[in-house]
Amino acid sequence: MKPQILALLGSPLPEGNTAKLLKQAIAGAEKAGCEVTLIDVPSLEFSSCREMYYCKEQSSCIMEDDMIPIYPLLKNMDSLIIATPVMTMGVPGHLKSFMDRCQVFYCAKYERKAPLIPAEKRKTRKTLLLSISGMNLPNNFDGIKISTQAFCDILDCRLADELLIKDMDNKVDLDRFPDLLKEAYDKGFALGSALTKHS
């Protein structure tokens, strides 16, 4: 069985610049010999976390919606790609709610001291972060990185690599920057290669 990578698209634009980066990273990971499952997060129907804390004692969420079939994918994946724009200096709403609904993993790891991720898998799981920002400020990606690092920690999927592109208000279209698209491809290939050489 090929190594399994989960790819999360956080942008509401399926043909936008964030999606273009993700498409290249997926192509690279597939070239390296991995199977990639794409999840278009804004198209999912789910509620934000209501802090009912059912997951303090159970390995799932009490709210039955589109997140329920996602949990096994997050548990069983070998690595993760997150592609997201910066919105209000942070993670877009739907993707942030997706992250928050992973309290299932937080409670298992930190409340019950029984992580859902097997010990062997924890050693090799890695995350690649792809992000774009319209503005050109020194702290454009601070909010995204803090939330992503916390998300990766509870999933036991270390944030290992990133491609952060700012000034998109002036760049406009990444098709005009094939070097950046190639960089996304190369990072996806590197993520996949790290898995296939151990499989």
Image: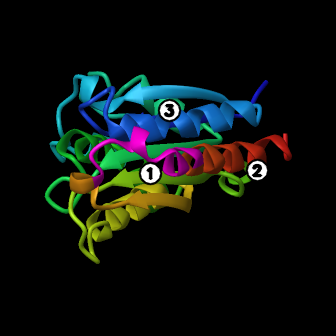
Question: Which residue was labeled with disc 3?
Answer: 23
Mark nearer the N terminus (3 vs 1): 3
Distance Cα–Cα, label 2 vs label 3: 19 Å
* Residue mark closest to the camera, 1 vs 2: 1
Residue sitting nearer the eye, 16 or 47:
16
Residue at 68% from the left image edge and 30% from the top image edge = 30
* Position of residue 32 measured from the top left corner of the image (x, y, whole percent): 75, 37
**For the residue carrying disc 3, how many other residues have a C-alpha within 10 Å: few (<14), some (14-19), or many (20+)?**
many
Q: Which residues are magenta?
A: 171-182
Among the 4 quarters of the image, the one containing residue 28: top right
Q: Within 10 angstroms of label 1, few (less than 14), some, or many (20 or more) residues?
A: many
Q: Which residue is mark 1?
A: 130
Image quarter of residue 70? top left
**Residue 142 x/y as whole percent:** 30, 71
- 119 up-or-down from 65: above or below: below
User: In front: 129, or 136?
Assistant: 136
